Amino acid sequence: MEFLFLGTAASEGWPALFCNCPQCKAAAELGGRNIRTRSQALLDGHILFDFPPDTYKHKLDGALDLSRVDLLLVTHSHSDHLYPNDLATRGAPYGHNFTAPTLHIASGHDALARIERVNGYENNKLSNIVTHELRAYEPFECCGARVIPLPADHLKSEDAFCYAIETNGKHILYLHDTGEVIPDVLDYLAHAGICYDLISFDCCYCVKDNTHLHGHMGLPNVVRLRNKLLASGVCDRHTFCVVNHFSHNIAVTHESMTAAAAREGMLCSYDGMRLEI
Ligand SMILES: [Zn+2]
Ligand SMILES: [Zn+2]
Ligand SMILES: [Zn+2]
């Protein structure tokens, strides 16, 4: 089974849209894996995590058939994770001959409300789309996957979710966007008895410690969290532990971030990174 990292930046991208900071200039000069678009990932070609404004670029870069996607899991309503206007292109006259006739979109209430607001905008009608409102810890089964929405430590104002997914006998934990994961979630994972094949960790602060712990993580936060997950059997030395979703505000290159992650036994994501799990 393939896990494909399509975009690996935080909300502004890296280089950021209007930014001339040293990190953005360095990324533009270095190019390659230093160029990061907004976060998105694709599991086994048909389960999509988040729908940022860079989805179209991801389709072009990866020569993807996104009409094959039958399940879209949206973590929360922030615009780097959800650009709902582009969902209107999944209907006539913008899209034809879908590989999967129906797209199921699952998320919390606020993200689904944002999607619903584009219905009728510019006379576009969302079609071939079925939405599912999720509740924390309530399993959701769809398109061959079993999904557990886990409360993220990201927003007080809405039900943002991290996701635990089981499909084809593999287990993935998608921890975006979140701080050092709330104790209830750690308890839940510790008692579920699942050792994950891949964990994607929020690492917005790059190598820096997020000392107030909430909202996002940096590598020191991720290491503390990973060590707790190791101790409770949620991951082991075979688990792909990947740091992902980086902000341009910290002075690192892809090379230095990769080295810092490697010292902790982890991988650093880049746009287009494929993992066979
Ligand atoms: Zn984000
Ligand atoms: Zn910048
Ligand atoms: Zn966010």
Image: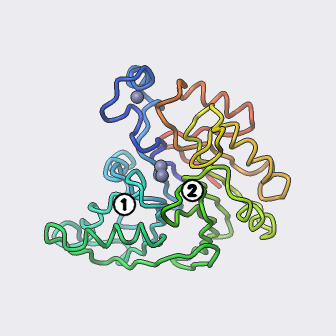
Q: Position of residue 198 (x, y in %)?
A: 67, 54
Q: Position of residue 268 (x, y in %)?
A: 60, 38
Label 1 C-beta lies within 8 Å of the nearest ligand 1 atom: no
Task: Residue under label 1, please give it.
Answer: 65
Residue located at (70% from left, 33% from top): 262
> How many marks on residues?
2
Q: Quadrant of the N terminus?
A: bottom right
Q: Position of residue 135 (x, y in %)?
A: 56, 76
In the rendered structure, are the residues bearing label 2 and label 1 in contact, judged by CB atoms less than 8 Å apart?
no
Q: Position of residue 178 (x, y in %)?
A: 59, 52
Rounded to the nearest whole Å, what is the CA distance between mark 2 and mark 1?
15 Å
Secondary structure of the residue carrying tag 1 is loop
What is the quadrant of residue 162 in the picture? bottom right
Residue located at (61% from left, 48% from top): 214
- Amino acid at pointer 2: Glu
Q: Quadrant of the C terminus?
A: bottom right
Q: Residues within 10 Å of mark 1 (few under 14, many from 20)?
A: few
Task: Residue under label 2, please give it.
Answer: 2
- Amino acid at pointer 1: Asp
Side of 235 where 242 appears, left or right: left
Residue located at (31% from left, 72% from top): 98
